[in-house]
Structures are given as C-alpha cells and as structure tokens.
C-alpha cells in the first residue's frame, strides 16, 4: 500500500534541480519543501522506524533509472533518425541550390552572349543592306551603260547600212552612166544619193561628193572609173568599220553577260545573307526573352530553395536544442536518483542515517 506514495516521492526527487555539492540533508530539504513530499517523508520515516523494507524503495529507484535510460535511448534513436533525414533533406536542398545557381550562371551567359550576337547581327544587317543597295545601284548603272552601248551600236550599224546602201546606189548610177545612159534619166536618183551622202557629214565621203558633183557637170569615162574605184574603197572601209563595230558590240555584250551574272550572284548572296541575319535576329530576341524569363524563374526557385534550407536548418537547430535540453534534463534526473540511492545506501545503517538526516532537517 505504501508503493504509490513512495513512487510519488521519487518522481518529485527526479524532477528536482540539484548539484553534486548538495548534501543528503539538502536533498531531503528540497523534497520536504513540498507538503506532499513532507507527508511522504513522514511515512518513510515511520516505515523505516518500524523496520519497513528499504529494498522496496531501491526497487522503485532502479525502475525510474531504467525508465529514464530507456527514454534516453529512444530519444537517441529518434535523434539519430531525424539527423539522417535532416542531412538527406539538407543535401537535396544544397544540390537543388547548386543546380539553380548553375542554371542562373548558364542563363546569364546565354543572355549576354546572345545579346552580343544580336548586336553583331544587327550591325551586319546594316552593312549587308548597304551592300545590297550598292549592288543594285551598280547593276542599274552598268545596265544603263550597256543599254547605251547597244543603242549606239544599233544607231551606228543602221547608219553604216544606210551609207552602204547609198554607196551601192551610187555605184549603180555610175555604172549606168558608164553604160551610156543619159545623165538626165538618172538625175533624180543621183541627187537623192548625193543628198544622203552629204547628210552623213562623214569625212570619208567628202572626196566622193566632190567627184560626183564634178561628174554631174561633165560625164567622162576617166572620171567614172575613178569614182567607181573610190566607191569600192569606201564600201570596203564601211564593211570593215561595220564589222569592227559588231565585234565591239559582241565583246561588250559578252562582258556584260559575265559582269551581270556576277552582280546577280552577289545580289542573291547578299539577299540570302540578309534574310539569314534577320531570321537570326528574331531567334536571338526570342532566346534572350526566354533566357530572361528563365532567369527570373530560376531566381525564384533559388530563393525558395534557400528559404527552405533556412527553415530546415532552424528546425534542425530547434530539434537539436530540444534534444540536448531533454538529454540534460534526464541526466539531471538520473543524478538525483543516484544521489537519493546514495542517501539510502550509505555505509551506515540506512534507516538510522535517514532518520538522523530528517531529524536534522526538521
């Protein structure tokens, strides 16, 4: 029947805060301060005075010590498990933080390098646009020059044809005169040819015009022969001149075909380059925008991970502090139990020592 009050007494002692320098008298004095503890001490005193078994008290003290040691082992196990879990969480968060940091560095480099590439592409587009304008201007100028050359050749070739026709007509008239046809019958044709030759104002025709003028006033065989020879020479020169002009025209046409081909190829290359650069600029801008957005996301993710790490570290610190406080409390409780056991099991008789100590307390 006395086990319950004795257990209550022991629990009171176990929760007391004492130091190793306290005497048995001081230990019992702390217990005696509690009214219920005072009553229990009275009961224990009576029990010991009447020869009650001290071993029953020792058993209870041993049970409490065993329970405290068991609780500490459970707390150690939970603490060890929590520590492993915490270290795993911390390692995962640190890995996540490192990942987000590396992503931020990579995205920053991508943004910066792409921004630099964008500036270079925009600068090159301006250069290529200018090159295209220069190419088109060169093509237009060269094309106009070639058109002018061709038109000049067409005009001069037509003049040569007209002049050769006039020479041929003059040769026929002179031959008719040589054959005895009266000049009066050929006068109209003669005057037309003469007028056409005079219109050309070509120095080559001046001797011929003079000779024909003289022939119109006096027809003689010697003059006719001289004029026919002159006509043949002039026609030969006209044929040679026309051939030379044709050769020049063909050479200029061939040169223009090569030159225009080069200009067109260069224009095609420049246009394709500009299209490529403009497409690259669009892609660069998209990449920069995506990199900026991803940077914002990664920055938020990093902040969240760092906040989570801070929370976990605070929680771990709180758990560690709680574990250390509870461990310290159990150690103090075990010390109280051990000291009470020392009081009850000192070298002198347990009963007499206990009673003696209580009498001194009171």
Image (cartoon, rainbow, N blue to C red):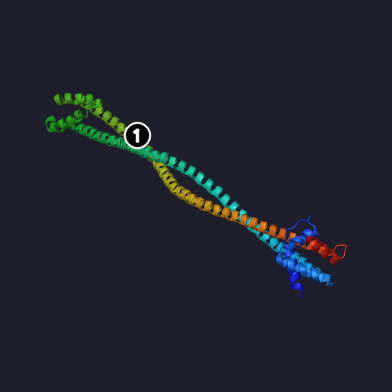
Instruction: Residue at 46% x, 44% y: name it.
Output: 118
Q: Quadrant of residue 180?
A: top left
- How many numbered circles are shown? 1
With 244 as the anchor, is 281 left or right in this view?
A: right
Q: Quadrant of the N terminus?
A: bottom right
Instruction: Residue at 77% x, 63% y: name it.
Output: 337
Residues packed near mark 1 inside 10 Å, few (<14), some (14 to 19) or many (20 plus): some
Q: Position of residue 212 (x, y in %)?
A: 18, 26
Instruction: Residue at 43% x, 48% y: name it.
Output: 282
276 and 327: which is toward the camera = 327
Q: Quadrant of the C terminus?
A: bottom right
With 357 as the anchor, is 216 left or right in this view?
A: left
Q: Quadrant of residue 43?
A: bottom right
Figure check: 156 above or below 10: above
Helix, strand or loop at mark 1 = helix
20 and 143: which is toward the camera = 20
**Which residue extends farthest bottom?**
1
Figure check: 55 above or below 127: below
Judge whether residue 295 can be spotted in this image: yes
Q: Position of residue 143 (x, y in %)?
A: 33, 38
17 and 283: which is toward the camera = 17
Residue at the disc numbered 1: 248
With 9 as the anchor, is 288 left or right in this view?
A: left
Q: Position of residue 246 (x, y in %)?
A: 32, 36
Q: Position of residue 320 (x, y in %)?
A: 67, 57
């Amino acid at each position: 029947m006395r086990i319950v009050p004795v257990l209550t007494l022991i629990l009171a002692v176990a929760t007391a805060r004492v130091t190793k320098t306290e005497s048995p008298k001081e230990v019992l004095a702390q217990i005696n301060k509690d009214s219920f503890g005072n009553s229990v001490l009275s009961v224990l005193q009576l029990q010991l005075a009447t020869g009650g078994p001290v071993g029953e008290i020792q058993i209870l003290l041993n049970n409490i010590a065993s329970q405290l040691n068991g609780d500490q082992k459970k707390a150690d196990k939970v603490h060890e498990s929590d520590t492993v879990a915490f270290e795993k969480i911390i390692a995962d968060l640190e890995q996540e933080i490192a990942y987000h940091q590396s992503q931020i560095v990579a995205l920053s480099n991508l943004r910066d390098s792409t921004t630099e590439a964008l500036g270079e592409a925009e600068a090159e587009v301006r250069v290529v646009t200018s090159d295209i304008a220069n190419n088109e201007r060169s093509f237009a100028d060269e094309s106009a020059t070639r058109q002018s050359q061709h038109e000049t050749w067409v005009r001069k070739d037509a003049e040569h044809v007209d002049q050769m026709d006039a020479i041929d007509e003059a040769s026929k008239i002179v031959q008719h005169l040589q054959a005895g046809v009266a000049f009066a019958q050929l006068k109209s044709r003669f005057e037309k040819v003469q007028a056409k030759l005079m219109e050309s104002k070509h120095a080559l025709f001046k001797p011929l015009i003079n000779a024909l003028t003289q022939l119109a006033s006096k027809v003689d065989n010697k003059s006719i022969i001289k004029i026919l020879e002159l006509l043949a020479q002039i026609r030969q020169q006209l044929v040679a001149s026309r051939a030379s002009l044709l050769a020049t025209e063909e050479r200029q046409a061939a040169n223009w075909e090569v030159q225009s081909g080069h200009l067109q190829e260069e224009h095609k290359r420049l246009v394709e380059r500009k299209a490529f650069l403009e497409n690259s600029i669009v892609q660069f801008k998209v990449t920069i925008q995506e990199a900026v957005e991803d940077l914002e996301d990664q920055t938020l993710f990093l902040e969240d991970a760092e906040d989570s790490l801070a929370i976990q570290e605070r929680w771990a610190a709180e758990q560690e502090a709680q574990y250390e406080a509870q461990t310290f409390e159990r150690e103090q409780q075990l010390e109280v139990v051990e000291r009470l056991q020392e009081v009850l099991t000192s070298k002198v008789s347990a009963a007499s020592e206990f009673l003696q100590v209580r009498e001194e307390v009171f």
